[in-house]
Image (cartoon, helix red, strand yellow):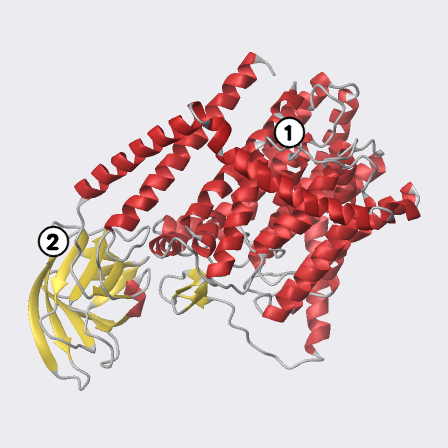
Amino acid sequence: MTDEKKICSEKIKYFVWILSGILLAWAFTAMILSPKGSIFCFFHEGEVEDYDVLPINSLADTVGMEMEEGVLKIGEPEACKGLFLRNDSLKALPYLYIQLSKLNGESLNGTLLGFDSQGIQVMEKSIVLVNGSNEILLTHEKLSRIEFRFTGEAGKKFYVNRMELRELNKEFSIYKYVLLFFLLFGLYFVFSYLVNKKISGHLSFSHSVRETMNLIQTVYFGLYERFGRIGRLFCEKAKSRLRMLCFFCVFLVNIYVTKFSNYHNSMVYRFEILLTCLCLFAAAFLYLSDNMKKIDYRNPLVTSWCVLCLMMIISDFIVPKRTMYTGYWLLLCWGFFFWVWNHMENPQIVLRELCRAFYGFFWLSVMFCLFCTERVPEFYKGMTNNPNTLGQFMSVSIVVILSCLLAENISYPRVVFISAAIDFAIYYTIMSQCRSAILADMCVFVIFFFSVMHLKKRKEGGGELRKKVMVCICATLLLYIPIAVGSEKIMEHNSVISSHFREPEQEMESIISNQNNVVYAAQLSAGKIFERFQNSMNINQFSSGRLYIYLQYLKNMNLLGHNGNLDIYGIGTGAHNSILMIGYNYGIFAVIPYIIMIIYGFVYSVQYMISTYKRPEKYGFFLCAMVVCTIICGMLDHIEQAMRYMPWFMIYFVIGYFFGWDEADAD
């Protein structure tokens, strides 16, 4: 390893060391000082009743006020706005918190009226509202409705960001948290220094993890001794086709179950896990060779992955979940596949067969979208159960298709065929209106052109590759309009035919705000995403309330994890962020190995892609682009559900490739 790479490796280790200390000190500080023992509850708020991320929508009809792009404007000297509260059977919450923004003036003066369940006025209180948070003490125990009245404030505008009732007043001391945080952070540094410098040979954490991996490898050896002869029953060509069939079945089971079944049903989930694991085990057995032995895992990627799996297992023991045993599947099934993979003399064979199987499955999916799924006016789900899932699948498809262009010596007619595949993937991504997929696609294309520019300089045949890329770009531009228009016509024709064989029905797939056009858990119709960007008042509104969802998940994290999604807006809502979902499902400390795993996966993929400019391997782009695509999808959508989403499969395939890889391999 060169001196520069050693320095880079040391910087990464220091970064991970400091990040781990910050997370640990933060978590313990909150646990010690928080009245509820919550990681993110820094003040005692008692019971809380939240009135939506945009509470302006839950208010009663407005009198003397009007709405202008989500902002309330007082149009008459006497104006009022009412809010229906809780049922009288619930506990009274005396503190009203209302957060305003975009107020054109120093303050907003008015009167707050309270009414009981019979509609009788029981409270009247003068109020002064300002930009930011406003706290109002309600002078009556139980109210069924409150009403804001503004006199002489015509012409003023304001925007309601949040409104909630609390049992207690906020109690928070920043000084206590800062002092305890730095104390714990200092103790972490002292302890970790002693462990690494003084007694690393006896109490090294990574050493303990390696011993755990050695124990798990004993299980792998048992499987190898019992089933190692399977691969000898077939010739190499037959084994290659069977392995691609196994990968194809993994993708098929994934899409079939999520499209036509309830993933959260216990029996459906177990059925999917069983079939997927059998396919992966079968593929691993067909890759077996005669030189199987234990590997001394010193790769930090393996350490973080193993720790994450163990924390998943511990969390499942304490807090049973619907998607149970994820840590077991990763350690035993995927771990055995990775172990076999890293014993191969030419591990790129797995990537080649994986891409070929996915490429065939992609065309099957396109046929399903064209002839078996109708074009709906609001959003398009294709062969998946959600438009976001469709967009993420197509982003993964673009990575695989572009890697096929770089990875093999293909003819020019096949280049045109690949261009058509890219057009279909782009078309269905736009149809899904998945923002994370669109952003991921843009980053993938940047990485692709970066790879091509370097490959043509450093590899033999780079000029020919550049010509094929130019042909692919031209063909993609020329074919997109015919493919898009033709697909629309075919789906419209299918819709007309299918309408004769069924009764019209209406599905409610989303929660839509009537006044502000805010859509939750769904996407806008094709062509509306840019209009949404222009008309959004803030990032939270453009992201369909994701910022609010993030905050709710942060507030409810704990040490041991939860079962299922958090209830937001009255329904179970996914976190739309993989890091938050890992922390919510498996506990706050599970976030540390997960982030470390993602960081090292990204770093190794970049190093590997750069190293392929000097060596004959052809899958550097695939590995790097797949990691970037998955990270972007995971930051804006919830992909961290075992065996469900395509980016989830691909990120673990990529991580497994680097289990036996060392930074010295990049030289």
> What label does residue 659 carry, if any?
none
Q: Amino acid at mark 2?
A: Ser
Which residue does the image show at 78% across and 44% down from the upper left? Answer: 356
Q: Position of residue 243 (x, y in %)?
A: 81, 48
**Image quarter for residue 122?**
bottom left
- For this rendering, which residue is in front, 228 or 234? 228
**Image quarter for residue 119?**
bottom left
Dot 2 lies on which element? loop
Residue 441 in view here: no
Q: Mark 1 — residue?
A: 449
Residue 616 in view here: yes
Q: Mark 2 — residue?
A: 107
Which residue does the image show at 76% across and 41% down from the upper left? Answer: 418
- Mark 1 residue crowding within 10 angstroms, few (<14) / some (14–19) / many (20+): few
- Mark 2 residue crowding within 10 angstroms, few (<14) / some (14–19) / many (20+): few
Q: Amino acid at mark 1?
A: Phe
Dot 1 lies on which element? helix
Q: Position of residue 62 (x, y in %)?
A: 24, 70
Asked whether, in this view, residue 237 is left or right of residue 347, the answer is right
Q: Position of residue 381 (x, y in %)?
A: 61, 61
**Image quarter for residue 365?**
bottom right
Which residue does the image show at 32% across and 61% down from the upper left? Answer: 54
Asked whether, in this view, residue 210 is left or right of residue 423, the answer is left
Q: Indicate the quadrant containing the N terminus: top left, top right, bottom left or bottom right.
A: top right
- For this rendering, which residue is in front, 203 or 501? 203
